[in-house]
Structures are given as structure tokens and as C-alpha cells.
Amino acid sequence: RGLDPVASIFKQHVTAEGTALVKQAEDAASNKKAEKRDVVGLQEQVFVRKVIELHDKYLAYVNNCFQNHTLFHKALKEAFEVFCNKGVAGSSSAELLATFCDNILKKGGSEKLSDEAIEETLEKVVKLLAYISDKDLFAEFYRKKLARRLLFDKSANDEHERSILTKLKQQCGGQFTSKMEGMVTDLTLARENQASFEEYLSNNPAANPGIDLTVTVLTTGFWPSYKSFDLNLPAEMVRCVEVFKEFYQTKTKHRKLTWIYSLGTCNINGKFEPKTIELVVTTYQASALLLFNASDRLSYQEIMTQLNLSDDDVVRLLHSLSCAKYKILFKEPSTKTISPTDVFEFNSRFADKMRRIKIPLPPEDEKKKVIEDVDKDRRYAIDASIVRIMKSRKVLGYQQLVMECVEQLGRMFKPDVKAIKKRIEDLITRDYLERDKDNPNLFKYLA
């Protein structure tokens, strides 16, 4: 049995090397944090790259030096599972992998690679995903980032987007990628829909709202959930919405449109004294700026009431227009933060050397929401799994139930035993299961 000790030493060695990479990335991230926050992203990119290189190196050893022996494949797998599930600087490895893919697949990402290299790298990332226990967390982060790439036209290449989905599907099954595939298909349909809308307008010149309008119609079920606020749109935009509704009614009677203004963009002309500048802004920002066509000065409260938005959104919005790089609005008092007593006025003397500027609106922190969403989905998954097991077994002991549940769900995530216990209690209160009268560790299925 000479191979066993060799394999176990091999495993220890790979684990040690991988753990060293994690530590290196941790240190680099904490140094960077001390210096400056915005370079952290690059560190994580380097970390994933290094893990991929490590995997290539040792996979070659297994294939060539150890004659592809299963013992060593197992050792390699177990070693990678150890350090691939450690996080770096507060980010889980699931999130790091999703970000890494995003950087490869988006326009202007930090990775400049040829098509073949991209394919090869994506292939390797999907291989690494096999070692990660929270695949559902990866899926959710990936979907959020995919949505941003698709909706803001940031995706560099449709082929690659589809190709990684095929790879993920092979690795994790069709259920894993069904929503993502739906999103990619949705965009193609949305483009066709836009074309027929433009045709509709050219046939009905009276309906033309006088503004170029592009609407992306998506299927709710495929996309991440977005908050939709009833933003009070400026009159010019209300007309657009009405026109599009009329057009959409001609195509289908039974579908309800929910407008998500938080994802919209808008180009407006700012007539400043030095010159007119085209401003590329979000729909929220545009609505706020258009209020100043009617009044010179507006208080925070007035803007909030007129737009009908929540405090957080108004603060982010006004900060981007009055405290950030481009000061389109003057703020009194001129501090760096927005408070509910501030008053704003249009900065007519605003100047910039560019003819057209993009005013960014910082996105809300999505990380917390992703983790909450995944947690919620996990609760449902555990419920469903317990009910499936109990339905086929009718009566089962606690330990066995937990073991089968962990085994069933293990392909997507490692369920926490405490969480399973909680779900069992919940199912008992909801009359799906009951405890045996004599043995509290025995459960019965109630049909």
C-alpha cells in the first residue's frame, strides 16, 4: 500500500501551497486596505489566477507523474476543497470566481486575452467551481453580474457568454443555468421587440413621443429581483411610457409591464452658459435634473416629494449631482454630505472640456442582498429535500434524515446542520412531519 502515504503527502503539500496563496492574498488585501480601497479588486483577480496556475501544475503531476491514478485525483480534489472554501478579505471564493469571470467577459475588463485564452480560462474557472461548496452563492453573484453586463451593454462577446453557460451546465446541471440562459435569450428577444417598436412608431408618426426611446422587455422569472419604485416621471417621460404601453398592448393582452427605472439610462442636454453639454445619466438623475427646468432652487424635501423616492435613493442621487466629480447642482451649505435640510440650485456656469460626460451613480451594495437571497432560497431547498426524503421513507430517524438531506443538497451547497434542524421544526409546526410519541428522534411523514 505504498501509494497511500505518497498520496497523503501530496495532498498535504498541495493544501499547504494553496493555503499560502490565500494568506498571501489576505495580506495583500489588508495592506491595500490600509493604503487605498479601490485597488483591492485587482488582488483578488491575481489570487484566482494563481489558484488556476496551481491547479494546472498539480493536475499535470497527477496525469503525468502519477499515471492518472484515482488516489491522486482524490488527493488533489480534497486539497483544493480545503483552501478553495476559505474566503479572502471578507469575500467568499464563490464571489471571487464570479468577479473573475465578470472581468474576463466584460468590455474593458482588466484581462486582455485572445479568444482561445478566454475559452481556456473559463474552462478552468468552471473546474475550480467543482471544489467550491457554495455553488448556489456563485450562481447568484454570477447572475447579478451577468445582468449588469447584459443590461448596460458591457458584455464583450455573446459567444463567450453562451460558452461558459454550456460549461456550467455540464458541471452543475441544467437547473443551475436555466435562469442565466433565459437572461441571454431574453436580450435577443428584447432587441427584436425594440425593432418592432421602432417600426410601429414610423407607421404611426402621431404616436411619436419626440424622444428616442429604447425599452428592454424582460421576463421577470429569469432576472435578479430589482426594487421597482413608482418614481414620479417628468412629463416628457410619462408620454414615452404611455406610447410604449399602447404599442405593447397591440402585441399582447395578458402581460403586465413593471417599469424598473433604477436600471434606465438617459441622455439629456445641459444648457450651461459656457456651452451645451450632453449628460449621460440614469433615469433617476435625469428626473431630478429636469425638476430644475421649472424652478431655480429646490430643497431636499421638495425634490424627495416631487420624485417620490426613498431617502437612501435621494441621498445617492443628489450626492452624484452635487458632491461628486461633476457639480451640476450647487448645494447649500457646500459640504461633502447630503442632509435633509440642504437646498439645491442649478449650476448654470458648469463647464467641462468634453462635449459629453457620463455622471456615474454609485450602485447600492449588492453583496448583502445576494447573500440574503441565497439564504432564503436555501431554506426552501432544505424544506423540499426533507419532504422528498420523508415522502419516500415515511418514517426516519433524525441522524439519517440529516445525512440524506446533506447528501441530496451537497451538489449545490453544504447545508448547515443547525439550519436543517430549524427547518425540521418548522415543517413539524406546518404539519408536514410529526415526532414519534415514544422516540423524539424519530419522524413520521404526514400526507
Image (cartoon, helix red, strand yellow):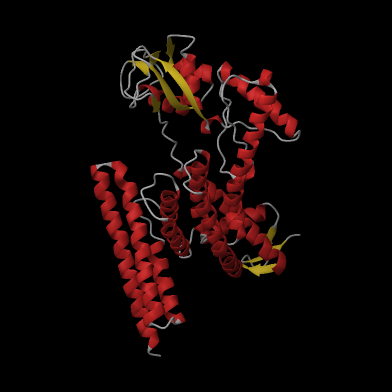
The relative height of residue 74 versus residue 355 in the rendered view (above or below) is below
The relative height of residue 399 versus residue 422 in the rendered view (above or below) is below
User: In the image, residue 175 lies at what x, y percent?
Assistant: 61, 57
- Residue name at image x 59 percent, y 65 percent: 408
- Image-quadrant location for residue 33: top left
The relative height of residue 407 versus residue 339 in the rendered view (above or below) is below
User: In the image, residue 101 lies at what x, y percent?
Assistant: 44, 53
Query: Observer-nearest residue: 267 or 55?
Result: 267
Query: Observer-nearest residue: 380 or 107?
Result: 107
Residue 436 visible in the picture: no
Quadrant the N terminus occupies = bottom left
- Residue name at image x 38 percent, y 54 percent: 113
Q: Is residue 3 left or right of residue 372?
A: left
- Residue name at image x 52 percent, y 52 percent: 161
Query: Observer-nearest residue: 278 or 186?
Result: 278
Q: Is residue 28 left or right of residue 447?
A: left
User: In the image, residue 37 lies at what x, y percent?
Assistant: 30, 42
- Residue name at image x 33 percent, y 79 percent: 9
Residue 361 visible in the picture: yes
- Image-quadrant location for residue 403: bottom right
